[in-house]
Image (cartoon, rainbow, N blue to C red):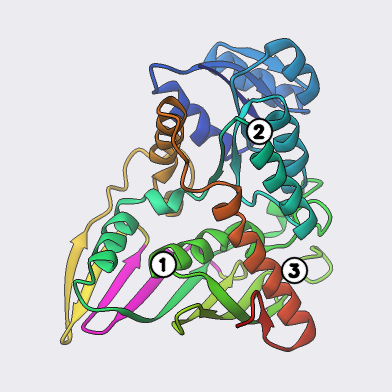
Amino acid sequence: MRVSVVGCGGVSKSHLKALSEIESITISSVVDIVKEKADDAARQYSCTAYYDFDTMLEEDKPDCVHICTPHYLHVPMSVKALTRGIHVLCEKPCAISSEGLSQLRLAQLMSEAKFGVCFQNRYNESALLVKDIIKKETYGKVTSARACVHWERDEDYYSDDWHGTLKKEGGGVVVNQAIHTQDLLRYLIGKNVKAVTAHVFNDHLKGVIEVEDTVYALFDYDDGTRAVYNATTAFSTNLPVLIDIFCEEATLRIEGNNAYVIKDGNTQQLHLADNTGFVGKNYWGKGHASLIRDFYDCIENDCKFPIDAVEGGKAVEEFLAIFKSSESGEKFYLKKD
């Protein structure tokens, strides 16, 4: 299968490395409007460099594209590829507006090609282990949850033409960094969000960015489960993400890619992370390679990829609800009884 990676920024390195390790994949091209980035990636992976997405589609004719571009390009590029019957694996978020999400879901429905969203933290060993324990109800049902993301992004991070802008990024910490943890909460709890009460702030870079750097949110899920969620990029360092899932008989904890069970005041380690061999930032986890392999297994076996535009788009619906709740000062219902 011939694959093109579109966008040669930081996250593309995880995609390119994972693709290079799959025998059935040929990286046929890379695309970036910055010539030097495309040329560097093309040299490293012995493929063709393109500087325009449409030109690549016409000339290279890939079987699949990986969309690793700025957020505002995710929908138009994905729709264009799906319309041509080309499989698409898209970085998060798959859309930054409800209109864009509807357009993407329609394109997926009308296409015979597969579409997937990169929420790779679902594939971290710690998340898979905790999810299995929750499904088996080893410690009873889930009663509540909490999540904390405390990271650092300084002014240099926003020095390009899209980070920190409403039009191109669509939001700050909610849309770009903590969306993985927001998605992971729903995945682990196993229920959809019914309502959101949230507050977003810019505490760190006023006058530098147009978007939020801090969020507090309260999620009410379908079954009455409640989760609290706090995320910021105004911290002084990048800490491992912390998620606690409170069950009837114990607490399951994910800290980075470590997993624990806390019961009767005692903490037992379930999984210890292997912190070697990272391509990106080590607090991302190593899930990209596993997710990408699963996506191509679904193509080969013609089965549904679990994080498609419907499932992956739920995170978009949630972060749009976060913004609406913060703006109104009221609880926002994604769906009413």
Which residue is under mark 2?
111
Q: Residues within 10 Å of mark 1 (few under 14, many from 20)?
A: some
Q: Is residue 179 above or below residue 28?
A: below
Q: CA distance from mark 3 to mark 1?
A: 35 Å
Examine the image and state in which quarter residue 249 appears: bottom left
Which residue is under mark 3?
205
Q: Is residue 192 above or below residue 146?
A: above
Q: Which residues are magenta?
A: 236-255
Q: CA distance from mark 2 to mark 3?
A: 42 Å
Where does the image place residue 165, in percent across and percent down from the top left?
81, 57
Q: Earlier in the sequence, mark 2 or mark 3?
A: 2
Q: Earlier in the sequence, mark 3 or mark 1?
A: 1
Q: Is residue 116 above or below residue 129?
A: above
The residue sitting at 44% across, 36% down in the picture is: 303
Q: Amino acid at mark 1?
A: Gly
The residue sitting at 69% across, 81% down in the picture is: 332
Q: Amino acid at mark 3?
A: Leu
Where does the image place residue 116, in percent across and percent down from the top left?
55, 41
As for residue 105 lying within the magenta part, the answer is no
Q: Earlier in the sequence, mark 1 or mark 2?
A: 2
Q: Residues within 10 Å of mark 2 (few under 14, many from 20)?
A: some
Which residue is under mark 1?
190
* Numbered disc in front, either 3 or 1: 1
Horizontal side of residue 121 vs 157, given as left or right: left
Where does the image place residue 272, in percent across and percent down from the top left?
23, 56
Horizontal side of residue 70 vs 3, given as left or right: right
